[in-house]
Amino acid sequence: MDDAPNSGRTIYYGAFVHCKSLQELDICESGAIGVGEDGKIAFIERGVSDIGLDGVKQTYDWGNAEEVRVNDEGFFFPGFIDTHIHASQYPNAGIFGKSTLLDWLNTYTFPLEGSLGDLERARLVYDRVVSRTLSNGTTAAAYYATIHVPATNLLADICLSKGQRGFIGRVCMNSLAPDYYRDASVDSVIADTRATMSHIADIDPKHDLVAPIITPRFAPSCTEDCLHALGALHKESGARCQTHISENKPEVALVCELFPKSASYADVYDSAGLLTAKTILAHAVHLSDEEKSLIKYRESKISHCPASNTALTSGCARVRDMLDRGITVGLGTDVSGGFSPSILEMARQAIWVSRHVAMTEGDQAKLSVEEVLYLATRGGAKVVGLEDRIGGFEVGMDWDAQMISLGKVSSDDMNLDTEGPVDVFGWESWDDKVAKWMFNGNDRNVSAVWVKGRLVHRRKSYKG
C-alpha cells in the first residue's frame, strides 16, 4: 500500500452518465472512476457501494487517493465542447435586434471586435467569457478572437491560465470589412496568423490545452488569393481550420457573386485547400446535396449553431440529414449571434430546431435527448479532433468532466436556491432525471468542472 500523504490521485464516486453511442446513454447509478495524477482515467468500476469503495482502493493500491463524491440525485457527465464561439463578441450576447447576418455584422459585431485592440478591454472580455463558459460545463472551445495579434495571444494565455482547452483563432479578413477593421494585405494575414501560432507554441509546446486554429472569417471577407494562402498554411502547419458556410441565403448569393468560377460555397474552400478532415464549418444551413457529398468526402466537420440560426433568422439546419449521410456534427453557441454561452442550452435549441424541421419534413427529422447530448460531447470531440481524449468516460481518456447536482424536493426544505432549477421528486427514473436536466438545467446545476483532472470551476456549494 502506498503510504505517501498525497498521491495526486482521485477517485470520483457516485453516478455517472455519458453517451455510449449517438442513440444510447450509458448510465451507471453507482460507480468509481479513478483519475491519476496525469489527469487520465486509470480505472472504472461499476456497482460500487460505500463498503465496496474500500475494496476498490485495495484492488488498485489507491489507499491514499482523494475522494470526490456526487450527491444522491446528481451525476458526473463529460465536459461540453463548444465547436463555434466568438470570444470577442461575448459582451453582445443577446443583442441582435431584428438584424439578419450581414447587417448584424456591420451594426453590432465589427465595432465591438475592432475595439478589442485595446488589451485591457480585451482582457476584461476574454477573462469573463472563459470563466462563463467553464461555469456552464464547457471544457473545450473553438474560439474566434479578432484580427489583433496581441489580443488573440491574450485569449490563449487566459485559456491556459484558467485550464480550459482552447482552439485559438486569429480572425483573417482582408475584404468586405470596414477600413478600421481589416487585414492590410495577404502577406499581413499570413504573418499575423503565424505570429499567434508561434506564441501558442511558446506557451504550450505540446498543445496539451491550447492550440492554434486557422480562421478565415468566411469566404466573403477574404479574397481568393488570401484563401489560397491560408490553405497553403493549413497544409504546411497541420493546424486545424475553422470558418463559416451557408449561414443564410443572402450570404450564399454573395459568395456566388464574389467567386463566379466556383461551383458552390463549399467548392470555394475546397479549391483553396481549406476543406479537409481538420476543417470546422459553422452553420451549414443551406447546403446543397452536392456540397454535403463533398463535405463528407473531405471528412470536414459541421458545427450546428441552432440558437444563432434562429436569432438571426438564418434558417433551420437539417442535422438529421447530415448525420444520416455520415457527416460529423457538433454543437456551437455562436456567441453572440447565439444569445447564450451554454452548450446545454444549445442542446435544447437543437431539439427545437429539429422539431420545426419535422413539422414540414416528417418526424424522422426530430433529434432525441440522447442525440443532442452526444453532439454536445462525443460529437464535439470528433469535430475538434480529440475524440480519443475527451467526450466520454473510458480508461485512458482525460478526465474532462462536470459534476451535475440536482435538488430533491423535500417538504422540510423549500429553498429554491440550493441546486438550480431542476426539481427531482424521487420517483423519476435515471432517464427521466437526465431529460429533466437537459430541458431545465443551467449553470447552477454545475457544481464543479475538471479539465484533464484539474479543478477549473466550482460553485460555492461544492464541498469537494
Image (tube, rainbow, N blue to C red):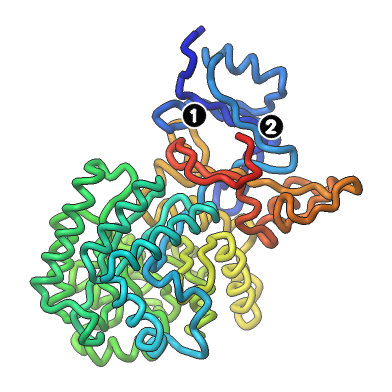
Crowding at dot 1, Cα within 10 Å, few <14 / some 14-19 / many 20+, comes out as many
x then y, percent, for residue 185: 11, 77
Residue 450 falls left or right of residue 115: right
Q: Secondary structure at mark 1?
A: strand
The residue under the point 70% across, 36% down is: 29
Q: Percent position (x, y) of residue 300?
A: 33, 63
Whether residue 283 sits left or right of residue 180 in the image: it is right
Q: Residue furthest right?
A: 411
> Can you tell which mark lies on residue 412?
none
Neighbour tally class for label 2: few under 14, some 14-19, many 20 plus, Cα within 10 Å:
some
Give the residue type that dot 2 points to.
Ser
Q: Looking at the image, can residue 288 be seen?
A: no
Element under disc 2: strand
- Write the residue at 24% across / 73% down: 269
The residue under label 2 is: 30
- Give the percent coordinates (x, y) of residue 385: 35, 51
| Percent position of residue 166, x then y | 36, 53
Type of the residue with mark 1: Val
**In the orientation shown, which residue stands out farthest toward the left?**
187
Q: Which residue is mark 1?
A: 35
Mark 2 vs mark 1: give the one in front. Answer: 1
Q: Residue at x 20, y 58 (%)?
A: 196
Distance Cα–Cα, label 2 vs label 1: 16 Å
Q: Is residue 416 visible to the viewer in this orientation of the structure?
A: yes
Q: Quadrant of residue 359?
A: bottom right
Compared to residue 431, the image places residue 279 above or below, namely: below
Which quadrant holds the C terminus?
top right
Q: Residue at x 69, y 27 (%)?
A: 47
Left/right placement of residue 182 relative to residue 128 reads left
